[in-house]
């Protein structure tokens, strides 16, 4: 029987790999930013799935999906939302899986509202909050990879090589 939470946009860099990371966002418009998360995870060969769901507009779907994450083998959740930005907090309340929050840039306050909503979790329900927008989306993927690398040598070596490549690129820059 197919999983009712199966993703239409699953990214399995290695054949038959089950997703280790769930990338969720509050609206389809967040994909322009969150595609950087997906692209980074794909570059590192990390199987993941991407979904749109809302803490406010689809609370039952969000609750069910978050509650089932651990059972489905998800080891890290990356949740992005703007404005009230409650998606990461709702996920953290429904799962023991680490949740990384990415605040989306907003029209009115340039994402400061999203940042404050994501970072202000009550003690006992943690959300690791990243930067607003694209830097946060990219770093959320890298942090998820670092979490997975604690028990997997392959992503650890890929991360080590990535960091060395970044350092080398800076060392070669001239003015």
Image: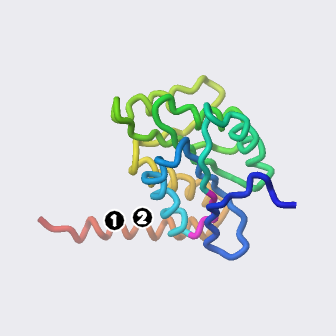
Residue at left offset 27%, top offset 65%: 170
Could you tell me which secondary element the residue under label 2 belongs to? Answer: helix
Q: Residue 65 carries which label?
A: none
- Determine if the magenta segment contains residue 104: no
Quadrant assignment, res 9: bottom right
Q: Where is residue 48 in the image (x, y as percent from the top left)?
A: 63, 60
78 or 146: which is nearer to us? 78
Using residue 3 as the reference point, say whether residue 160 is left or right of it.
Answer: left
Could you tell me which secondary element the residue under label 1 belongs to? Answer: helix
Label the magenta part by its dominant secondary structure. Answer: loop
Q: In this view, does 62 lie above or below 48?
A: above
12 or 3: which is nearer to us? 3
138 or 154: which is nearer to us? 138
Q: Position of residue 69 (x, y in %)?
A: 73, 48
Quadrant assignment, res 98: top right
For label 2, the residue is 163
Q: Which mark is residue 167?
A: 1
* Magenta highlight range: 45-49
Q: How far apart are marks 1 and 2 (CA)?
A: 6 Å
Give the farthest residue toward the left.
Answer: 175
Q: Is residue 80 above or below residue 139?
A: above
Q: Where is residue 154 in the image (x, y as percent from the top left)?
A: 60, 70
Using residue 133 as the reference point, say whether residue 44 is left or right of it.
Answer: right
Residue at left offset 72%, top offset 45%: 65
> Which quadrant: the N terminus?
bottom right
């Amino acid at each position: 029987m197919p999983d009712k939470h199966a993703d239409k946009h699953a990214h399995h860099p290695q054949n038959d790999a089950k997703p280790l990371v769930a990338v969720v966002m509050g609206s389809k418009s967040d994909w322009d930013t969150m595609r950087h998360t997906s692209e980074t995870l794909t570059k590192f060969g990390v199987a993941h799935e991407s979904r749109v769901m809302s803490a406010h507009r689809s609370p039952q779907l969000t609750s069910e999906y978050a509650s089932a994450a651990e059972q489905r083998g998800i080891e890290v959740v990356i949740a992005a939302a703007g404005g009230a930005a409650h998606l990461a907090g709702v996920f953290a309340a429904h799962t023991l899986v680490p949740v990384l929050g990415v605040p989306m840039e907003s029209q009115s306050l340039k994402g400061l509202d999203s940042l404050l909503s994501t970072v202000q979790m009550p003690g006992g329900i943690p959300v690791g909050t990243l930067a607003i927008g694209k830097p946060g989306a990219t770093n959320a993927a890298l942090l998820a990879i670092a979490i997975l690398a604690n028990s997997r040598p392959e992503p650890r070596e890929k991360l080590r090589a990535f960091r060395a490549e970044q350092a080398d690129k800076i060392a070669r820059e001239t003015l």
